[in-house]
């Protein structure tokens, strides 16, 4: 694997994640209010989601369908009988004084996903349970006041609780990314982490070696980026390790990660299940899922990332690493397949996607849907390299100008006179000039110092203003020198 399972001081971390994913339904979990983001505060509410006395909940059937699809994708066992429960706690953004969730009889149990690493190794991470619940509202704290917005209250969520199978921050991030990718493929969650569509709670403990029983668990709440998950885990593992070395007692508590300082801070003592006084929701009947319903959802499943990765390796002869990168985003995988279909060069397309395209997406912080070049424009540029019209370095310059200016590859190449010189007579003339001006280096080459070849090729390319075909230059220059 790409990371060790113990830290430099010899301690093992035991990590589990609880992922909260907002289902991309148009209405809330137990009422018909809109789930649209960014509306004026407290406008997407009704008596049900604002906790008015006598208001009765009704289950959103589309949310159930989406939850079942997610459970199937994560290889879970679907429970035919589901019970919704009241999870009792007080907080200003929870007007009922309880959250409708699932506890003893959740939607699904005993699942798993597989994560992969750059070296080709894989690890299976278990999923304890996947259950449905409603979201709470949102508090905004100012200097002199705290405000409550209930627009988010009642939005449908699934909570995916992992087994404590992860041992490093890298494994935890890989697992979180894998879940996000699968949810995006299923189109059951928008996975917009900035808007809170996908959030993560971490459970982490430390032990001296992997054969000891688990240490005292600490929870870190509400992380909404992969980078924050990694940073929070590195800090917390180091903090707990120092405490054990100093014979200090680690207490079970809930902490928050401060992204500005990079540290975790104590929030409250960790609650146990009995603190929430779970009991069956009296206003909702048990949710019964028959086999025909489950089979219908199974039949509607799209090709998932693992299967697509295997297909890319087999069909396009890509390495596991290349295929895994290209299938880690549903839209990127589609763009890649469109590109390959257009120019029939799988490996070349893979290289361009991972180097230039994904670099640009990261720099501009955009998704492939907002990328300025469609697959045909990029394909035309790649074709100009394959045909020998321009070399790779010139192609990168053209690519950057296409991104900024919007012109096609052909237009830029013609306008700037970038077309590569492949004419043997023209290149031979330049080579003869370089040889006559560089007799000392020519003699060094003939005396066996072949490394000087690169210097001479560079001179030829400089004289041709980068337009000479490098392959032709190398071949002709070698012949001349020998």
Image: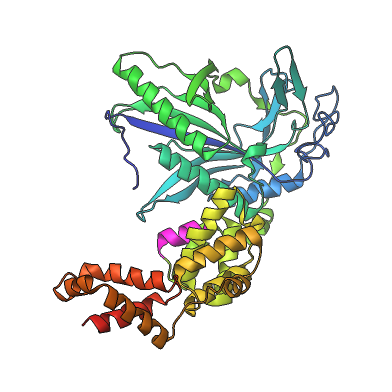
Q: Position of residue 382 (x, y in %)?
A: 52, 72
Judge left or right: residue 192 versus residue 16.
right
Could you tell me which quadrant the C terminus lies in? bottom left
Q: In the rendered image, is residue 384 in sight?
A: yes
Judge left or right: residue 447 versus residue 53.
left
Magenta segment range? Answer: 319-328
Q: Position of residue 395 (x, y in %)?
A: 51, 68
Residue occupying image coordinates x 54% and y 46%: 179
Vertically, is 340 above or below 2?
below
Residue 73 part of the magenta-drawn span: no
Judge left or right: residue 228 versus residue 86.
left
Judge left or right: residue 355 versus residue 237.
right
In this view, the residue farthest toward the front is 437
Q: In the rendered image, is residue 96 in sight?
A: no
Vertically, is 119 above or below 194?
below
Residue occupying image coordinates x 56% and y 71%: 381
Q: Position of residue 287 (x, y in %)?
A: 71, 41
Q: Nearer the viewer, residue 162 or 377?
A: 377
Residue occupying image coordinates x 57% and y 73%: 413
């Amino acid at each position: 694997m790409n990371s060790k399972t113990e830290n430099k001081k010899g301690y093992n971390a035991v990590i589990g994640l609880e992922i909260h994913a907002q289902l991309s339904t148009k209405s809330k979990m137990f009422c018909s209010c809109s789930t649209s983001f960014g509306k004026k505060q407290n406008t997407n509410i009704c008596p049900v989601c604002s906790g008015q006395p006598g208001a009765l909940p009704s289950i959103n059937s589309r949310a159930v369908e989406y939850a079942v699809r997610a459970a199937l994708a994560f290889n879970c066992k679907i429970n035919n009988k589901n019970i919704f429960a009241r999870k009792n706690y007080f907080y200003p953004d929870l007007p009922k004084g309880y959250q409708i969730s699932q506890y003893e009889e959740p939607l699904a149990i005993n699942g798993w996903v597989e994560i992969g690493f750059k070296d080709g190794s894989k690890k299976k991470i278990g999923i304890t349970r996947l259950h449905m619940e409603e979201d709470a509202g949102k508090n905004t704290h100012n200097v002199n006041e705290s405000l409550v917005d209930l627009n988010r209250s009642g939005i449908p969520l699934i909570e995916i609780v992992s087994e404590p199978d992860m041992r490093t921050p890298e494994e935890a991030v890989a697992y979180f990314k894998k879940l996000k990718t699968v949810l995006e493929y299923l189109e059951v969650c928008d996975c917009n982490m900035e808007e809170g569509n996908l959030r993560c709670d971490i459970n982490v403990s430390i032990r001296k070696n992997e054969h000891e029983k688990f240490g005292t668990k600490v929870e870190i709440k509400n992380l909404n980026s992969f980078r924050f998950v990694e940073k929070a885990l590195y800090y917390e593992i180091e903090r707990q390790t120092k405490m054990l070395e100093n014979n200090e007692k680690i207490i079970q508590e809930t902490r928050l990660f401060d992204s500005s300082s990079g540290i975790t801070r104590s929030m409250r003592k960790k609650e146990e299940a009995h603190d929430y006084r779970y009991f069956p929701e009296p206003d909702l009947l048990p949710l019964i899922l028959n086999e025909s319903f489950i089979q219908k959802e199974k039949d509607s499943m799209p090709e998932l990332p693992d299967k697509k990765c295997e297909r890319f390796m087999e069909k396009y002869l890509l390495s596991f690493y290349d295929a895994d990168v290209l299938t880690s985003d549903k839209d990127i995988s589609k763009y890649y397949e469109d590109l390959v279909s257009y120019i029939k060069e799988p490996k070349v397309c893979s290289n361009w996607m991972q180097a230039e395209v994904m670099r640009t997406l990261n720099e501009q912080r955009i998704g492939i849907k907002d990328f300025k070049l469609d697959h045909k424009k990029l394909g035309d540029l790649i074709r100009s390299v394959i045909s020998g019209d321009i070399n790779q370095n010139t192609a990168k310059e053209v690519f950057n100008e296409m991104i900024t200016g919007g012109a096609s590859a052909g237009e830029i190449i013609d306008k700037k006179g970038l077309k590569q010189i492949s004419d043997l007579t023209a290149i031979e003339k330049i080579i003869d000039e370089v040889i006559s001006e560089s007799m000392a280096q020519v003699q060094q080459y003939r005396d066996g110092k072949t490394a000087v070849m690169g210097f001479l090729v560079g001179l030829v390319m400089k004289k041709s203003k980068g337009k000479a075909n490098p392959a032709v230059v190398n071949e002709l220059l070698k012949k001349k020198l020998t």
